[in-house]
Amino acid sequence: MPEGPAPAPVTQRLRVRYAKRGRLRFTSHRDISRAVERAVRRAGIPVAFSAGFTPHPKISYAGAAATGVASEAEYLEIGLTETRDPARVRAELDAALPDGLDIVDVVAVRTGQAKPSALADRLHASEWRIRLDGVSHDDAAAAVTAFLDAGTIEVERLTKKGRRRFDVRAAVSACEADRRGAEAADAPCAILRMVVRHTTPAVRPDDILTGLRQVADLAPPSPPLVTRLAQGPLDAGTGGLADPLDPDRETDQPSGDDAATAPGPSGQAASADAVSARP
């Protein structure tokens, strides 16, 4: 067993929404994790560490987007050894991160008798925006119609368990060609927006593009630009996504060193800087 005192216990858990923008979309998840750890140290955030011979900061990630994909809705959870005002942590962590990794929202996990649900368990689906340069809106809209009319669309992809065939149509809750977004773009293109359920194996945007190629021969001449706009609980009635941090939003003021700088009784001091689950 390692010698020395036990690590300080976790007294507060913060859930963080962050964005991966611009050139940072090409950064691997491992490098993003390292950047977050460095930023936590620079900002002086009292992160808790695991026990053992090689202690690690207690930072966990949920539903990370693949390398090469931009995102407005990435999530992590961090354990602290002291209570901190979430708005202060948001500002300090954002300032310490490189441009393109931007903190959108920070919420303290509720404390009480009921154990809060795991963050990963709230991420049921993602909303995606896919820009297809060199594709007309009409061609994209026709392909989407053919895709949605199909009962089953099977694609094949190499996974960690080998090559697998799976149905991509069943995972797509909604899909449309966004004419207004395409008209506002800086070059001729089509823009697709879709809500995709989180399944096993995961259905990725490129899998859906493969399905569109199968049913409508839609083949963009250049690589697509993919952005995750949101992820969270899927509302079966509306087809929209809720904010996965909403159940954690506190109404009580934090205690400890930051009590004097905490938000008022409404707990909404940072709401002006937060981005909704559906940007």
Image (cartoon, rainbow, N blue to C red):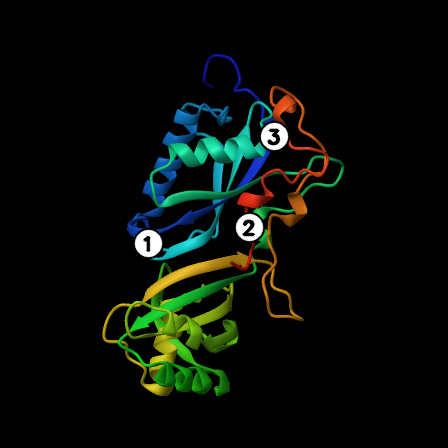
SS label for mark 3: strand
Mark 3 residue crowding within 10 angstroms, few (<14) / some (14–19) / many (20+): some
Crowding near pointer 2: few (<14 within 10 Å), some, many (20+)? some
Q: Residue 81 vs residue 94: left or right?
A: right
The residues bearing labels 3 and 2 have C-alpha atoms spaced at a distance of 18 Å
Q: Which of 76 and 226 is in front in this view?
A: 226
Is disc 1 surrounded by few (<14), some (14 to 19) or many (20+) residues within 10 Å? few
Residue ID for mark 2:
120
First along the sequence among labels 3 and 2: 3
SS assignment at label 2: helix
* Position of residue 176 measured from the top left corner of the image (x, y, whole percent): 47, 77
Q: Residue 67 carries which label?
A: 1
Q: Return the residue at label 3.
A: 12
Q: Is residue 278 in view from this perspective?
A: yes
Residue type at numbered disc 3 = Gln
Q: In this view, does 177 lie above or below 275?
A: below
> Could you tell me how far apart the alpha carbons at marks 1 and 2 are, in whole angstroms?
19 Å
| x and y percentages locating residue 206 in the rendered image | 35, 69
Three-letter amino acid code of the residue under disc 2: Ala
The correct choice, above or below, for 122 with respect to 155 in the image is above
98 relative position to 82: left or right: left
Mark 1: secondary structure: loop
Q: Is residue 176 above or below residue 251?
A: below
Is mark 1 in CB contact (under 8 Å) with mark 3?
A: no
